[in-house]
Image (tube, grey):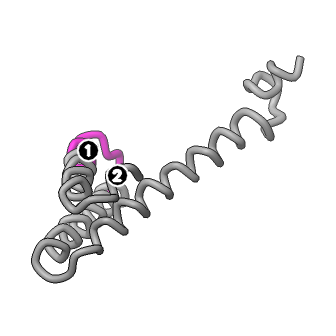
Amino acid sequence: VVLSGDRVAATVAAGVFCAGMVVSLFFAPNRVMVGLTLGFVVLTVGFILMDWLVVTPFLQFLTLFYGVFIGSFSMYDIYDDLITRTVEGSDAHACHQ
């Protein structure tokens, strides 16, 4: 989210995201994950090219969306794993006792 404020910073953040996605291709367990990963890489590279060649704020909005989505999903995951889980042996159950 912090890197979505400037054009160059958004480009660097998108490049790091694409590099991370390409590295994750080596650990993809099936064809669906490979397809999703390549789809996100193509989408992000398309936004990079569109931002630098056509219209300016597209890449900043995309990096902002990625950051907010990842942050909100991590908050939901923490809430689900540590607070609402009632399975015996979970962290929430251990903290309750």
Residue 9, relative to residue 94: is it above or below? below
- Which residue is pictured at 48% across the width and 51% down the height? 70
Q: Nearer the viewer, residue 69 or 97?
A: 69
Q: Amino acid at mark 1?
A: Gly
**Label 2 neighbourhood size at 10 Å, few (<14), some (14-19), many (20+)?**
few
- Which residue is pictured at 30% across the width and 57% down the height? 37
Outermost residue, left direction? 53
Residue 46, quarter of the rendered image: bottom left
Residue 80, relative to residue 94: is it above or below? below
Numbered badge on residue 80: none
- The residue where tag 1 is placed is 20
The x and y percentages for residue 59 are 27, 68
Most common secondary structure along the magenta stretch: helix
Residue 35, quarter of the rendered image: bottom left
**Label 1 neighbourhood size at 10 Å, few (<14), some (14-19), many (20+)?**
few
Numbered badge on residue 30: 2
- Which residue is pictured at 63% across the width and 44% down the height? 77
Residues shaded magenta: 21-31
Q: Amino acid at mark 2?
A: Asn
